[in-house]
């Protein structure tokens, strides 16, 4: 079995399991929270030293990326629990990262601002 085949098989198994999507979402949430805690700590240090910049690169972007990944995994857990995550041939219905589309597919009512934000995550 090639490395690509191993990855594809893992994804096939993972995409069929609500629990795996939930665990993935929780793990991403913890990572996101850790980064945001560091962002806030860096901001406090910058304010204390009366500077606009932290001494390290901003972690805000990566924290937002993890937030988007967490929302994606949570939506896919809902779809998997409902039995609508897969096409009739067994392939995943959502392979992209369209958060607004995933929110629509699970029935969330989004404001214009929510939709704008999700499209940029």
Image (cartoon, rainbow, N blue to C red):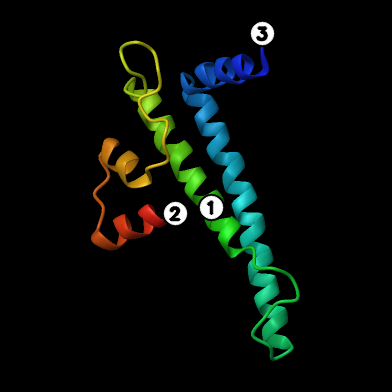
Task: Tell me which corner region of the image, top left, top right, bottom left or bottom right, holds residue 4.
Answer: top right
Q: CA distance from mark 2 to mark 1?
A: 6 Å
Coordinates of residue 111 in the picture (x, y in percent): 24, 58
**In the visual, does 5 lie left or right of 96?**
right
Q: Position of residue 29 (x, y in %)?
A: 57, 47
Q: Determine whether the residue tagged by mark 2 lies in a helix, strand or loop.
A: loop
Identified at 38% across, 30% down, the residue is: 94
Q: Secondary structure at mark 1?
A: helix
Residue pictured at 51% horizontal, 30% vertical: 21
Marks 2/1 in contact by CB < 8 Å: the verdict is yes
* Looking at the image, residue 2 lies above or below residue 71: above
Q: Nearer the viewer, residue 69 or 6?
A: 6
Q: Which residue is mark 3?
A: 1
In screen coordinates, is 73 left or right of 110? right
The mark that comes first in sequence, 2 or 1, is 1
Q: CA distance from mark 2 to mark 3?
A: 35 Å
Mark 3 touches mark 1? (CB < 8 Å): no
Left or right: residue 33 versus residue 80 is right
Residue position for label 1: 65
Q: Position of residue 17 (x, y in %)?
A: 49, 20
Q: Which residue is mark 2?
A: 121
How far apart are the two marked residues, 3 and 1, measured between alpha carbons? 32 Å
Please name the residue shown 70% across and 73% down the image: 42
């Amino acid at each position: 079995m090639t490395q690509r085949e191993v990855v594809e098989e893992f994804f096939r198994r993972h995409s069929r399991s609500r629990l795996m999507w939930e665990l993935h979402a929780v793990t991403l949430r913890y990572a996101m929270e850790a980064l945001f805690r560091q962002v806030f700590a860096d901001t406090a240090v910058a304010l204390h030293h009366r500077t606009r910049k932290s001494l390290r690169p901003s972690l805000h972007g990566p924290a937002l990326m993890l937030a988007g990944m967490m929302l994606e995994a949570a939506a896919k857990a809902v779809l998997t629990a409902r039995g609508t995550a897969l096409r009739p041939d067994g392939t995943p219905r959502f392979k992209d990262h369209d958060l607004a589309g995933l929110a629509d597919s699970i029935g969330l009512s989004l404001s214009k601002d929510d939709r704008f934000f999700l499209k940029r995550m």
